[in-house]
Image: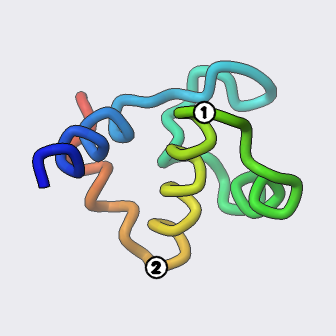
Amino acid sequence: MEDQKQFLVELAKAKMPFGKFKDRYLIDLPEHYIVWYKNKGFPKGKLGLQMASVYELKLNGLEDIVRKIRPT
């Protein structure tokens, strides 16, 4: 349970490290971009896990959960 909380806190702070949307919070990436990555294949490692989680959150309309814990 604590690991899940920590994962969400880290996800809330995570930003895209490269590309057109560099420095944008992952949770704020456009849906079409996340879907494109879903079809192409998410990156390996932690970033890929975070992006896959963003995909699932957006798919289920739950992205506000992450936005509420994001730093201001």
Q: Quadrant of the C terminus?
A: top left
Tell me the element at label 1. Answer: helix
Which residue type does callout 1 highlight?
A: Gly
Question: Mark 1 or 2, which is nearer the eye?
Answer: 1
Q: Quadrant of the N terminus?
A: bottom left
Q: Nearer the viewer, residue 68 or 18?
A: 18
Which residue is rendered at x = 67% and y = 61% of the image? 31
Q: Which mark is residue 33?
A: none
Which residue is rendered at x = 84% and y = 63% of the image? 39
In the displayed image of the protein, which residue is found farthest to the bottom? Answer: 60
Q: Position of residue 38 (x, y in %)?
A: 75, 60
- Quarter of the image holding residue 64? bottom left
Which residue type does callout 2 highlight?
A: Asn
**Residue that badge 2 annotates:** 60
The local crowd at label 2, few if under 14, some if 14 to 19, many if 20 or more residues have their Cα within 10 Å, is few
Tell me the element at label 2. Answer: loop
Of mark 1 and mark 2, the one earlier in the sequence is 1
Q: Are marks 1 and 2 in contact (CB under 8 Å)?
A: no
The local crowd at label 1, few if under 14, some if 14 to 19, many if 20 or more residues have their Cα within 10 Å, is few
- Judge whether 54 appears above or below 42 on screen: below
Which residue is rendered at x = 44% and y = 30% of the image? 14
Q: Which mark is residue 45?
A: 1
Q: Is residue 55 left or right of residue 20?
A: left
